[in-house]
Amino acid sequence: MSRAARSGNSLAAGIAALARHEGCNSTRYPGVVVYRVTVAEPPTPTLYPSSLILVGAGEKQAILGDKTYAYNAGYYLVVTSPLPMLCRTIASADEPVLTVVVEIELALLRELLLEENAPPAPQQARPSRSVFRAPLRRDLEDAGARLLACLTDERRTRALARQTIREMLFLVLDGPYGDSLRALAEDPVSQLAHVLRHMNARFAERMRIGDLAQLAHMSVPTFHQHFKAMTGSSPLQYMKALRLTRARQMLHAGGMVKTVAHDVGYESESQFSREYRRFFGWPPSADSHVAPRARRALRGADGAGGKIVLDPS
């Protein structure tokens, strides 16, 4: 592990103060959550929200196809649209992973770009995928630390959180891959981002590819081409990954397997269980009503060997 991954930065104390429980912890600002993770996990399908992710200590790795994006105390990660990826966690009780996840609000981004009044980036300069990592500069680290500090107080959160997040987005736009974030507010990336948000908001409903293409104002072949370039998967692969990763979140929150299967759009519990096992490598019961360390033991006992069948390339 790199020195940056082992060591922390000035964000670590602020995250630790807010992340009192294992896993996801909400904050006073709806668009910001903090994580404390003390259990290492092999690459596991995970739904990444449209977000800026800063790490105070430890390391995680997002894997999309044949690309691995390591983010730690020295690098931040940006996911411009909701994206299922494999997530590897390098953590222990002595060296937890501490992260803060800041939702990218499209309205706030557009407001910032309107005031910035910068010319559109050249089409050929835009990356084909909606995820990138970049070195964590001191100014962005300082802004993140100030955001964490204001989240400890309700009045400071109301007065300062939004403008601090705005500052952080500006610094990302001003960074080496700012054009990737800027493209989120421009066509055709903006059209696809709208479709991805639609899919995430209504993931339990049946969706026709033709209807999604129409929502993006594209023909079906063009929609397929741009969708795979942006997400690394087909619309059907994306929808299945979305439903199953949402199901895992619900199971972790205490949901019953039968209820969760219905809530994510499956009519058959047996079909849901088969697809869940094929996708994650273990049955849904291994993720339901069990503490993180016990889940890992159940997965190993199941004999699936942690096999993951997500190929978003």
Image (tube, rainbow, N blue to C red):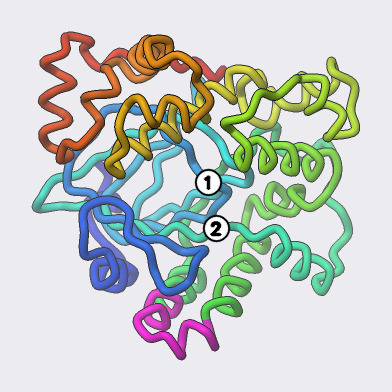
Residue 99, x across and y down, in percent: 35, 57
Residue 256, x across and y down, in percent: 30, 32
Disc number for residue 103: 2
Examine the rendering and report whether any part of residue 103 can be seen: yes
- Give the amino acid at mark 2: Glu
Q: Which residue is mark 1?
A: 49
Q: Are marks 2 and 1 in contact (CB under 8 Å)?
A: yes
174 relative to 259, above or below: below
Quadrant where the C terminus sits is: top right
Which corner quadrant of the image does residue 100 belong to? Answer: bottom left
State which region is magenta. 146-160
225 relative to 199, above or below: above
Please name the residue shown 85% across and 64% down the image. Answer: 118
- N-terminal label among 2 and 1: 1
151 is within the stretch colored magenta:
yes
Residue 70, x across and y down, in percent: 40, 40
* SS under mark 1: loop
58 is within the stretch colored magenta:
no
Find the distance from the CA under tag 2 to the CA under tag 1. Answer: 7 Å
